[in-house]
Image (tube, rainbow, N blue to C red):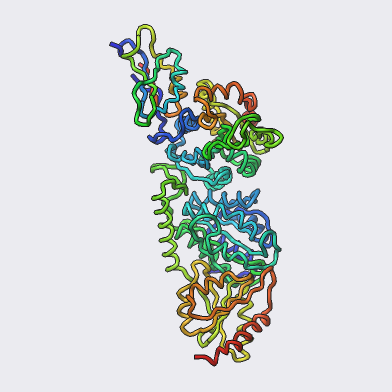
Amino acid sequence: MKKVFGRPKSMKAAEFHYCPGCGHSIIHRLIAEVIDELGIQEKIIGVPPAGCAVLAYNYFDVDMGEAPHGRGAAVATGIKRSLPDRIVFSYQGDGDIAAIGTAETIHAANRGELITTIFVNNGVYGMTGGQMAPTTLVGQDSTTTPGGRRLERDGFPIDLSEMLAIAHGSVYIERTSVHSPKHIIHTKKAIKKAFKTQIEGLGFSLVEILSPCPTNWKMSPIKANEFINSTIIKNFPLKVIKDEVGKL
Amino acid sequence: MGEKKLLRGSHIIAEAAVRAGCRFYFGYPITPQNELTEYMSGALASVPGGVFIQSESELAAINMVIGVSMTGKRVMTSSSSPGISLKQEGISYLAGQELPAVIVNTMRGGPGLGNIAPSQGDYFQATRGGGHGDYRTIVLAPGSGQELADFTRLAFDYADKYRIPVMILGDGMMGQMMEPVEFPDPIDLDSLPHKSWVLDGAKGRESRIIKSLILDTAAMEEHNWKLYRKHEIIEREITHVETFMIEDAYMAIVAYGTASRIAKGAVKKVREMGLKVGLIMPKTLWPFPKKFFLEAGSFITDFLVFEMSTGQMVEDVELALRGRRRVHFYGRPGGVVPTPEEIAKAVTTIYYREQIDRRD
Amino acid sequence: MADKLTKASIRINTELCKGCYLCKATCPENLIFVSGKLNSKGYYPANYSEEELDIEKHACKGCALCAIVCPDLAIEVYRG
């Protein structure tokens, strides 16, 4: 029999450090599969974040350069401006991109930097132990919102992708999820489209991916995926937020 | 052959950077160094491969520097004191990741927003690493237009050679003064030494990681010692110090940058009065020329450290002399630029009070 | 015998498994079970064994849904 599914070539043979049921490693795999399919392993450079995915460089078998917390878009900008014919992506969590790194991200998008950002939205600061993220839902528990996020104290969750869609230099922005096989398959398509947007030199591209964090949500992996399906996608609807690829 | 030009200090650094092969500059406006940023915007638009971005913040600028440095190209950013504080996060990462970069600090009065007048209040920040963690950056302190040009070239060479961030420390006066400068020819980019560690896509080789996260404590300790050993090599190899009339001096003023120019005038004045006073001008503030001071202490009994601050470099002079000689201090913080006469008066007071030339 | 009847198969690297059981919940044929033996990480891993299945009734179709949802790249899929 022939192997039809296995470890992508662009991934190292390393065991993931992520918790059981974590979405990060699924997203890593999807990125690696896209890198393989586009044949860009030897010309792609990744920028991992601070946070749970800080160790992403242990898994991707491509050149990787660590960015300080939130600065992925600026570091990626430097790399891409230096090497315009390479493919550059930043991999960022919600705290990284939508709190501490908001300015860098919006300005990179608005300049139309030819980079691709993979924005993993799990609504929580995972690595630091489950504090409120900019994307934590109203009412959702975290270690800094005991009893749930309250509007009057904590404000609204931020719709960063929608904000980025307003930026003139962004070309393709989509929100997807990895809570079911169907959504995982679609997420891969979105990632591929985002990379192609960059390869074709069209502008800034970003895929926001809703991702489970069973450990900090204090749910089983199966329940965590159900929570995305029942609740999170109501607040963060899955959709193409901006697509000007065909128009350019 | 080189080229002679009359330029202001900020433009000298910018022109020298481009001639040193710097094709990437990222910066954010702040007075008193905007002329540097403005010059780079034009200069990099007119050289092939030049990239200039006026960034959204100092943080963004230094992180764009990190990105370019990862690809092995020569890159520079500049700012003034408050902006340099913002860049310190990135400078710490550059140090941890062992990435070369050149950072210009045109110091102004502080703390906080302070003012825009020439100051030397950032000496500690510059020479003690500046950001978090156990590291140093090379700190160059030019004192003339020609030195601005020469040290800018050196800054890029040192950054590449030692894989370390290098800071050029000046102030608004250095930045504004017009001086004729002999620029060296632009370097041939292809002549720069090959960098074996860059990120450029893992074509035909193993993939690479540039990072500063080292969770294993033993490995982190080893990394810290590795940086320390590098610092030791730098201390041995690149200490610069200039002197003026110290051969027969009993007393020496110690000053850098703008202060050293004022001090030179003061030395000329007190020499006319017959006082045996010279001038020591450290040009590398880190590494500090410790060994030189020990040697100078064999014949100079009194050192007057003059800084445009409340006293920062004076600690390094005291450390270098290890209590063997008297160290005096004269400071004018807050952006005040004293006259040579004022410094001459301070020298004279100490000289007679301590009866310097009657001892031995 | 089983090999001849099965057109597809999966292989679970039980040492990589962290016991999230997303694969078990996803398999349309209910072919994945929880092993009674701890792996070296301390999890009861998901497992698949044709020996323990009634291949006549339940056969792996090689749909790969289990591998697609596996966060730990523990599952390889083979088709005949």
Is residue B48 something one can see in this rendering? no
Q: Is residue B101 above or below residue A19?
A: below
Q: Position of residue A138 (x, y in %)?
A: 66, 30
Q: Which quadrant of the view contains residue B29?
A: bottom right
Q: Is residue C64 above or below residue B328?
A: above
Q: Position of residue A39 (x, y in %)?
A: 45, 33
Q: Position of residue B206 (x, y in %)?
A: 39, 43
* Residue at the spot 51% in from the left edge and 61% down from the top edge: B137
Q: Which quadrant of the view contains residue C67?
A: top left
Q: Is residue A110 above or below residue B13?
A: above
- Total labels drawn: 0
Observer-nearest of A83 and B348: B348
Q: Is residue A103 above or below residue B288?
A: above
Spot the residue most to the front: A147
Q: Is residue B244 left or right of residue B28?
A: left
Q: Is residue B159 left or right of residue A197?
A: left
Observer-nearest of B12 and B168: B168
Is residue B69 something one can see in this rendering? yes
Q: Position of residue B25 (x, y in %)?
A: 59, 54
Observer-nearest of A4 and B49: A4
Spot the residue most to the top: C56
* Residue at the spot 70% in from the left edge and 62% down from the top edge: B114
Observer-nearest of A152 and B75: A152
